Image (spheres, rainbow, N blue to C red):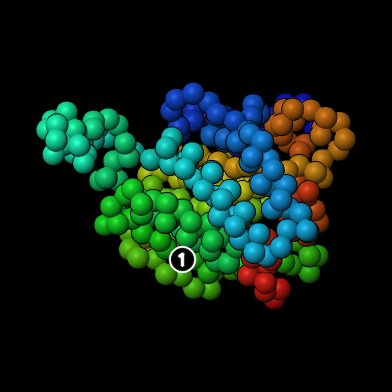
Amino acid sequence: MPDTATESLPANANQGAASEGPEIGLDHGYGPRVHILEDAWTAAATAKLSSPDCTHTELVQVVRALTTRLATTAFGRELPTSERSVSTRMAEKHGELGTWRGEALDPAAEVVVLDVIRGGIIPSQTCFELLSLVHPIERLRLDHLNMQRVAGEDGRVDRVELTGSKVGGSIEGSTLVIPDPMGATGGTILRALEHLKAAHGMPSRLILIPLICTPEFLRAVQTLDMDLSVYTARVDRGMSDRDVLASPLGARWTEERGLDDEDYIVPGAGGVGEVLNHSWA
């Protein structure tokens, strides 16, 4: 096998990052498009998310809180900005001195949040609500794709089935945000983009927010020839050989494995979509 993560990887895996400003999170070899948050609260939240002792009520709350942590970081770094001026409540008393001026999210930017049903319902709704607090609703939309991983006879996922959707119009030139609890194979993202491109156009930028993902997921999505960034709380590679696990994240990317034979993430958190919905079909 190759000794370095740059061999046999997506051609654009190590190209320039979409984000600007200082790097954040863990150092790794997955390329500058990937951001892995590193702090004690995030680590504790993903541990809670993964535990079988986490009740359903707690799980929903943790998913919302962890999504908020990742999303606000991503939005602050990735969404278009512009110079803004806002007259505050103190303007009545102090006139021009009561006007705040600075750089903030550009209210003219078109942003579409995509809910990949069913695991992504809560993360996507959370992202939509966060954005609706600060961004004009006329420039914001929450779309839905009903997608399902389908396993072959060997138990491994061999395709993603798209049985229905609710997309509110063109996404051409917009920033597309796709939150999802688990980024496993990356097949769902690739299939979603394929469908959207054919029917609704292509976004100018893609922001992916999986709470936990795998090296396989990162390889898959970085084959996309577009401006994209990934924000995650954890990259799991538990199916890798011991010597690979002892190496820094991404240093031996081509040898890292985070998926078992049924494409579940290890250590992961189990079937989070099923647990969130309490639906095991």
- Work out which quarter of the rendered image holds the N terminus and state it: top right
List x then y, in percent, for residue 41.
64, 40
Point 13% across, 39% down: residue:
92
Question: Helix, strand, or loop for circle 1?
Answer: strand
Amino acid type, callout 1: His
Q: How many marks?
A: 1
Point 86% across, 31% down: residue:
243
Give 177 or 259, whichever is nearer the viewer. Answer: 177
- Relative horizontal placement of residue 138, taking residue 18 as reference (left or right): left
Q: Disc 1 marks which residue?
A: 144
Q: Please indicate, yes or no, whether residue 265 appears anywhere in the rendered image.
A: no
Q: Which image quarter: residue 204?
A: top left
List x then y, in percent, for residue 258.
75, 46
- Relative horizontal placement of residue 98, taking residue 38 as reference (left or right): left
- Relative horizontal placement of residue 51, taking residue 7 as reference (left or right): right
Q: Is 50 situated above or below 168?
A: above
Q: Farthest residue in the front direction?
A: 93
Q: Is 33 situated above or below 216?
A: above
Point 33% across, 48% down: residue:
134
List x then y, in percent, for residue 271.
71, 62
- Relative horizontal placement of residue 71, taking residue 265 as reference (left or right): left
Q: Please indicate, yes or no, whether residue 75 appears anywhere in the rendered image.
A: yes
Point 68% across, 65% down: residue:
56
- Work out which quarter of the rendered image holds the C terminus and state it: bottom right
List x then y, in percent, for residue 249.
71, 31
Q: Residues within 10 Å of mark 1 (few under 14, many from 20)?
A: some
Q: Farthest residue in the top direction?
A: 22
Q: Which image quarter: residue 216?
A: top right
Q: Is 228 situated above or below 22?
A: below
